[in-house]
Structure formats: C-alpha cells, structure tokens
Amino acid sequence: MKKALLVFAAGVLIFTGASCKKSNRVNYGNFKVINDTTVTMNGVINGRTEDRFDKLISDHPKINTIILEDCPGSKNDDENLRVSKKIYDQGINTMLRSNSEIASGAVDLFLAGNKRSYEPGAKVGVHSWSGGGKTATDYAEDHENHKPYIDYYKYVGMTEEEAKDFYFFTIKAAPADGIHWMTEEELEAYNFVR
C-alpha cells in the first residue's frame, strides 16, 4: 500500500510539473501568448516587464501584435519607456479592442505600435506624472524633466511639434491623482491610429 501511494504521489508531482512548465511557455508576466504572432497584455507595467518581454520575443520571435486589454499604467516610467522602445524597434503592432482600458504609461506603450488600431469603445486615460513631491505641471515647459517623454514620442514617430502638443495635453488634462478619458475627437486629433 505504501508503495502504491508513493507511485501515486510521484505521478501527481510529474503531472503538476508538466502543467507548470506549459503555463510558463504561454505567460510572460503582463503578456499572454495567444498564437505565434499575437499576445495580449494586462496589468501594471513594472520592474520585471522588460525582462519578460525580452524572454517573450526570444521564445516567440514571430510576435507582431500586442492587444492591450486592461493596463492601468506603470510603476516605473524608465522601464516603461525602454519596453516601449523595444516594441517599436521590433516593428510590433498594438491594438485596442472595444473593451480595452489603458491609462498613463500604458498609453505611451500603445503609441509604440508600428501600426496602431483602435475599436470604438476602448478607453484611453491620461494624466500628469508626479515624483519627489512635485507634478509635471510644476515645472516650466522648457524644464529637462519633460525631455524624456517628448524624446520618446519623437522616437516612435511623432514630429517635435506633435510630441510636445501631445505631451503637454496629457499633463494638463488631469492631475497626477486623476484621469482624463480621451474623447474620440482627441484620439483622432493626436493620430492614435496609424
């Protein structure tokens, strides 16, 4: 009887191990593989997102589309901009479905898409950033703290004027502890789809 239990226990461990291994192949933190070319993205962009994105692309080099579903923002703007630049450099497309909801740093990530598609009904939220007891609007428009964001928007294809217009729109649209859900007219004005 003891021998039978040990064999059964070993079988459970083997089965569980195989199940975990399979799960690791399809989930990479914020990213979930749908097929050879498409992943979905959910959750807050954090200090592990870049490593997981790198592993995703290493394991699935044909990925060409990220569908952002429920992405409330980022905990680390530097990490977010690095991941976003990698998405842009890989030529990956970004997509919002009608039930998608993205905000803050996830909006920047969406803008990295080589092609960007949007279904009416998707929610896109922007606001000011904050840090060190100050918010973005506490700094003069020519302050160096604005430069990383403006440079990023230019990196992903905006002109200098477009980058500044969009950036200053976002930081003035809502305070750091608030959110402004962009209207269809605003999405069109800032060329969200391309």
Image (cartoon, rainbow, N blue to C red):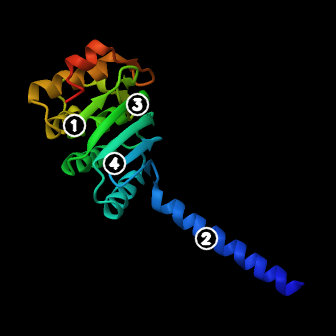
Residue 13, how many percent across, how many down? 68, 73
What residue would you read off at disc 4? 79
Category of crowding for the residue at label 1, using alpha-carbon neighbours closer than 10 angstroms: few (below 14), some (14–19), many (at least 20): some
Alpha carbon separation for disc pair 4 and 1: 22 Å
Q: Quadrant of residue 78?
A: top left
- Residue 102's tag is 3
Residue 140 seen from this side: no
Amino acid type, callout 1:
Lys
Which sits earlier in the primary sequence, circle 3 or circle 2? 2
Q: Is residue 52 left or right of residue 155?
A: right
State which quadrant residue 12 falls in: bottom right
Q: What's under tag 2, amino acid-wise? A: Gly
Query: Comparing marks 4 and 1, which lies closer to the viewer?
Result: 1
- Residue shown at 19% from the left, 30% from the top: 194
Q: Mark 4 and mark 2 in contact? Answer it, CB < 8 Å.
A: no
The amino acid on which the numbered mark 3 sits, given as a three-letter code, is Ile
